[in-house]
Image: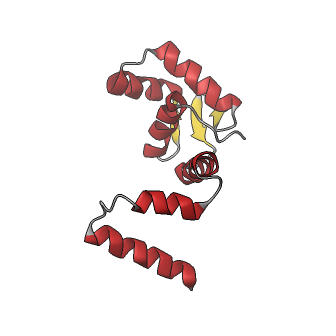
Amino acid sequence: MDLKLFDSELKVMDTLWKAGGDLPAGQIAKILSEEIGWNRNTTYTVIKKCIAKGAVERRDPKFQCHALITRKQVQSFETEELIDKMFDGSRQKFFAAFLSDGELTEEEITQLKEMVSGLEK
């Protein structure tokens, strides 16, 4: 399974995730036509790419699409790829860069502290 998804593939996956993981291809095409102006052929082409990557499973009847990967899996993959590519694989460098602008609200700081505290337990 290839978790590296292009923006177009993420649009299909996002539509599926918002629907709970299952939608007919025709419904995905309708949603993406309304949201971003894609035509039916474009949507079906991208769905087929998602199927080829193992991100979506086609089920019959009526070309039912089922998400095989979760948003969290893709987020984790993309985060690791970013850290590897931009921060030499160092999470410490990533967090230092993320926190360096000082633009966090008090609430965000509290939430981050709670997350780190949870990791220490």
Question: Please, is residue 11 above or below residue 48 in the view?
Answer: below
Residue 106 versus residue 30: which sits nearer the camera?
106
Residue at the image position 56 percent from the left and 65 percent from the top: 92
Please state which of residues 62 and 77 is positioned toward the viewer in this rendering: 77
Name the residue at 43% across, 44% down. 18
Q: Is residue 113 visible?
A: yes
* Residue 57: % across, % down: 65, 36
The image quadrant where one finds the N terminus is top right
Q: Is 108 above or below relative to 87?
A: below
Q: Total number of numbered labels?
A: 0
Foreground residue among 86 and 36: 86
| Residue furthest right in the image | 1
Residue furthest to the bottom: 121
Quick check: 106 left or right of 17? left
Figure quadrant of the C terminus:
bottom right
Residue at position x 34%, y 27% in the image: 35
What colour scheme was applied to this rendering of the protein? secondary structure
> For residue 49, what is the image quadrant?
top right
Q: Position of residue 99 (x, y in %)?
A: 41, 62
Describe residue 106's horizontal placement relative to residue 112 as left or right.
left
Is residue 62 something one can see in this rendering? no
Residue 119 percent location from the top left of the image:
55, 78
Q: Residue at x 52, y 38 (%)?
A: 13
